[in-house]
Image (cartoon, grey):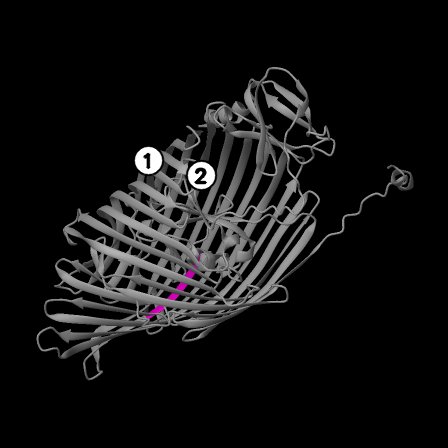
Amino acid sequence: MKNVFIILLLIPFCGYSQYKISGKLVNENNSPVEYAEVTLQTSNSISLHSELTNKYGEFNINNIKGDNYELSIKYFSQNVYSQFIIIDNNLDLKTINLNIGISLTGVILENKKSLIENKVDRMVFNVENSVAATGGNALDALKLTPRIKVQNDEISMIGKGSMLIMINDKLVQFSGEELATYLKTLNASDLKKIEVLSNPPSKYSAEGNSGIINIVTKKTKKDAWDASLRTIYQQSTYAKTNNGGSFNIQKGRVQVNSGLNYINGSNAPEYTNQIYYPSLTWEKVNNRRDFSNLLSTKLGMEYKINDKLSTGFNYNFVSNKPLRKEIGKTNLFDSQTKALDSIIKTISRGNYEKTTSTLNYHIAYDIDSIGRKLSIDFDYFNYKNIANRFLKTQTFLPSNEPIENNLLDARNYGFQDIQNYAVNIDMVHPGKWAEFNYGGRISFTNTNNYFNYFNIKSNIEEIDSGLSNEFIYKENTQAVYFSAEKNLSEQWKTKIGIRYEFTQTEGLSKTVIQSNSKSYARLFPTFFLSFTPNENHSFSANYGKRIKRPGYSLLNPFKYVSNLYSYSEGNPFLQPSFTNNIELEYAHKSNLITKIYFSHTNNNFDQVTILDEITNIEKIIPLNYITNKMLGINQTFIFKLSKWWNINTSVDVYYSSTNSTIPVTLQYLKGWNGEFNISNDLTLNNNKTVVFNTNVWFITKGVNNLDYNSNGIQVDTSFKWLLLNKKLIISLNLEDIINPKGIKYTSYSNGIKNSFRNYNDDQCFKLGIIYNFGKKINVNKREYKNQEEQNRID
């Protein structure tokens, strides 16, 4: 692998000579033509260099590789000249006469992109053109993005699973609450676009069956600073506040970005579960109160060493100290008489200390004028979690008398430390035949997991070695990739790629002296083809193979005890799953997008609930047991019904067929499901400073892998008021305002029916205030001492 990366570094610099081309443009009156765009293109229409003429009509293009080119000239978006040239030495084109006949009087130039763009390998949502995104944050913008679903602050693709998040092509290492918090610190006004890569090309990691979301931010204005202050008050069952700010500055060759955010408060989720044993029906209700105490910071700097070389870093730190209080009650009813048999009451309190640190250092080098670019990224990620949980559970008779020998009093103490180091090399290499992209990545992950379980008797703690464990896990991955993108004609484009990943893992349970090592190598091909007959219609097809690796906590074999009859544990023998994805798409004017998709997943893993009707013990463990095929169609409608009313509708209907390889679950389940979303954006005044939005999400009754799911609906509304030249933004959000109870899922274990419903206390209102401000920096310039003489020139 070492030799491979050396070769990748040397390839860009090998074997070519560079020349320059110059010339002068004049119009019909022999006057110089200023601001004309002179472009060099390869034979397959890849633009390599673009230069504007000066006030004398002159242009100079340097560092050109010897080859055949087409020189084209545009004057205010109109093609006015083209010529095929051969570069094998320095070339002076002398004077070029143009017949332009364009008057600039009263001309207003505007180049505004469509709200939605379809490219050969991704769908692009141009946030900067969205009225509905005004005044929101990055998470709000994702809610408006076609095919993306944000529910309970979890981001997924409709009909599929969760997605990886990238900011400016750099992976965000956060997950869960930390990820949602990070995205809420990014103002939507600072976002340029959101790219949805349902089948990411070979440049990106093959991790994740549902693809990648890449959020692209706007560039900081030159020689200026800007800042933002925000506060959000949320009221659900309890109150929660989110306060923060950011400061960015760009001066000369240096750019600095920073931010600070703090969340404090609580909410009250409720989880219900029914287990239908032959003789008893168990009805569980678990009421929680989750307290948040989260502080996040970010700091980034970019330094432009010269016109070709730049470097910089991004650092993020999150300190999260949540507190979780749980009160659980399980009523056991006789299945025949429905009479109450007994009651299990559980009380627990968990204190957690979580810290997350991410660091990225990068170097970018623009090698030459033909577009060759080399980038190197060094990444570090560290996650630590200290958990201290007290648990007390007791079984009672219907008369509320405690049953003898049915008391559990215990404490769990755990520590988890995850570290990852990675190096990524990426090369963009335009060529005569196509544009190439190649590179590689190496990644090293180490995790240490320490867990002790104590039984408490008479206030004395005794360690239980059978339920305690120390687990070490290591995972190393090396990858190389190559892709080529080519314009076959003005209408046809294609992109093909291949990625090779080799992974080695080792898990060691010190407590039971059990070791498990494995390695696997896979190829991940990608293919894209698009046809655009005219500006109103486009067709595309793509294929890609993906991998889904188990989360680190799922591999840890320690047991987590919920009560005397329920526990969960990890599985160090879990294997990754693999998915093949195929998509066909048609787009009409970027207003109507139809996508047909098919996916086939082998050896998928998930949590399995194993129920024993003899002991009534519930065991939850992750296993590889799922083979799934899914065929679906997604229809997106984006219409501007009037100058004040925009509507965005998404309809997704899919058929799922799932097989199981273990006897515990259903052996086969198939059926339909559907998800519908409609968003209405109303601009209530001519200045576009008062905006109202309603968003409705609905899921039909259907199947999800080997589970049945009920229907569900969520309705959200938001009102935004922009004041002080749109610097002050006041927003009011009402979320989940209709029938908030969550979706019910039903599965079968050993023939026993098991239903559960999770409600995360989503019904709430939010009041937010954001104030953005900034200023242009006055750059001192040396005054010319001969200014008076210069002013005398006619």
Asked if the stretch drawn in magenta spans residue 390, the answer is: yes
Instruction: Determine which residue is flagged by label 2.
Output: 443
Q: Nearer the viewer, residue 55 or 274?
A: 55
Q: Which residue is mark 1?
A: 519
Q: Residue at x 60, y 15 (%)?
A: 88
Label annotation for residue 147:
none
Mark 2 crowd level (few <14, some 14–19, many ≥20, 10 Å Cα): some
Q: Is residue 178 visible?
A: no
* Quarter of the rendering occupied by the C terminus: top right
Q: Residue 172's spot in the image, x, y percent? A: 47, 49
Kind of element beneath mark 1? strand
Q: CA distance from mark 2 to mark 1?
A: 14 Å
Mark 2 in CB contact with mark 1 (< 8 angstroms): no
Is 8 placed left or right of 36 in the picture?
Answer: left
Q: Image quarter for residue 678?
A: bottom left
Query: Where's residue 422, x and y in %?
Result: 48, 40
Looking at the image, can residue 726 be seen?
Answer: yes
Asked whether, in this view, residue 409 is left or right of residue 384, the answer is: left
State the residue lying farthest toward the top: 88
